[in-house]
Image: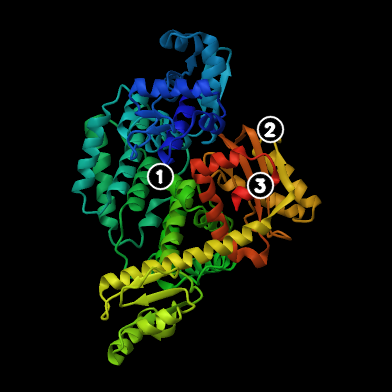
Amino acid sequence: MKADKKNALLRILSRSEEGCRTSMLANMLGISERTVRNYVREINEDGQAVILSSRDGYRLKDSNYNLTETPTENEARVWRVLSDLLTSKVGINAFDEADELYVSASTITNTIIPQIKSLVREYSLRVESQKYQFFLRGSELNKRRLIGNIANNNSYGFFNTRDALEQLFPNQDIPGIMQKLYGLCQEAKLYLNDFAMNNLLIHLLVILIRLGSKDDLEEKAAPALELLANLQNRDQIVDLANRIAETFARDYGIRIPERDYQQILALIALSAEHDLTDIQALVSQDFIDDVVKLLDRVSLRYCTPEFNNEFVQQFSLHMYYAQRRCAFRISYPNPIGAQFKRDYAPVYDMAVFFAHLFAQRFHVEFNEDEIAFIAFHFGSFLKSNKQNQSYISCAVIVESYHTISKRLVDELSTTFSDRILVTEVLDMNRYLRRPPECDLVITTLPLPDSALRTVQVNPILTKQNLAHLREELDDIDTEREHAQTRDFLRQMFHKELYFRNIEEKSAEEYIRFLGGRCLENGYVTGEFIEDVLRRESLSSTVFTDVLAVPHAISCYAERSFICVVHNDTPLSWSGRMIHFILLVGISEQDMKHFKAAFDLVIELFSSPERTMELLKTDSFEEFCSHMK
């Protein structure tokens, strides 16, 4: 849709450090240059953003611009019809809706209803029709999931939850109800952080709205008392649920059925934070042992450090509540999940792998929000438990005072014992006669210009000196890793696995096409292709505006490879329009390179400037040159 293209344009400009030329934007968006200029003019006229034009191309005036989508006229119509479908007991009539929206009945039936069908299908709902009468069919619980996710994710461009719900239910006093529920939660003797509080309020508000329309749960809810059994704050949870029920009855004349009451108890229990000194008071040892076994498989596949006991305890508790949320079919939206997926793609992929194993073991289904929460835990652990890098050789230049030099070298060797190897200790004269061969020079004296990487410190190390040294060592490790990764990537591209302008109808067909070519050339087995499709079904592998990176979740390749499709015209992949597909296969012995290689590929395609250079390539040789 037009609004999607405009937002994609703004997203590209917000990430670009330089001006973006009209031809570049047109190519990336799959539109004409004239359309680009029209979009820029409309955005500036609407005040959505300020786009400046110069000889270098377009750029945003505010480099910190925060992209918020504005609903188009068509989207507003979809919203209105969806609202009527959700609130009507007898369905909606196409002619009545057309009169209300000042459009033709054919627009309702041929344009708006198909969009709604696509939207609700994700929630196991369907739109049925009898002549020109339409009905929203499906379980009440799934209808509530739909409403909650629209509100939490600010769908259709509304700026916040309240705005979304006010548009969806114009006859309800949304602000007043939210304020009343907020007061009850604040008075409760429970701790809810802001995020959990907001999530709880939305769920309670949706329950109240639906009960007000006589839409109570048909399904039997899981008994919440089992969830509360071992919680120290059980009485406070029950007390808050009772006070909410009393408020519903007193102020809104709504009696809460038992199934909905159980749902409210579960919502509160899964939103409040619990002070647990002994995790096994809540989580069984068998459950923890199962989590450890799954973590071992993650560690083995992705070559991560072994997960320590502290991580296992906290993570097991998180997974217990995640499993409980699935059992009670309660969503827990993750507001930065999509950004985390894009910025930390390999860590997110580890989370997808774990979620897949956990889902098989415990017969649950995780959405992308829950997967992103798992990724947060993995990312935090990996950041604080980096695997040892190979030692960095250092030469130390210090005044010729034996005591000072010995103390300095001892402190350096002790503080960075797992990272550096001091190979030489020199005075200035010896350094000038023969510069050392090493990765890093640490000196207490100013040095003349040198090709060697150098850090100057005080004879007695300060906190600032240590911080500077850590930054320098991190930079060296990163450069080494990038160099190794670039060498690895060079070996993964093969001319027989490079394709231009391939036309298929779906992501599955593209995967089968690329997988078939890899199979013909002996890179994979047939099982690998099915495994890639399984991974794609769990979470889309579109990681940037132009790129999808399908890959296996369990299988290994016979030989490591990257199979490339580069289309000039954007192709459709899971609702996104992209230009590149990189089917990645890693052999078991090469999995130690997976995270770094994945990171580097995503980084290359995250920059609009680099992406444009890749879009201009027209041959395997040109493409590989820019990837290197």
The residue identified by callout 2 is 505
Nearer to us of marks 1 and 3 is 3
Q: Residues within 10 Å of mark 2 (few under 14, many from 20)?
A: few
The foreground one among 143 and 518 is: 518
Q: Which label number is shown at residue 374? A: none
**Crowdedness near tag 1: few (<14), some (14–19) or many (≥20) residues, C-alpha within 10 Å:** many
For label 2, the SS is loop
State the CA–CA distance, disc 1 to disc 2: 31 Å
User: Outermost residue toward the bottom?
Assistant: 402
Between disc 1 and disc 2, whose residue precedes?
1
**Gap between marks 1 and 3, in whole Å?**
25 Å
Give the quarter of the image for residue 571: top right
Q: What is the C-alpha distance between the residues marked 2 and 3?
A: 15 Å
Q: Which residue is mark 3?
A: 533
Q: In the rendered view, would you say 350 is above or below 431?
A: above
Q: Identity of the amino acid at label 3?
A: Leu
Q: 191 and 565: which one is in front?
A: 565
Disc number for residue 333 = 1
- Colour theme: rainbow
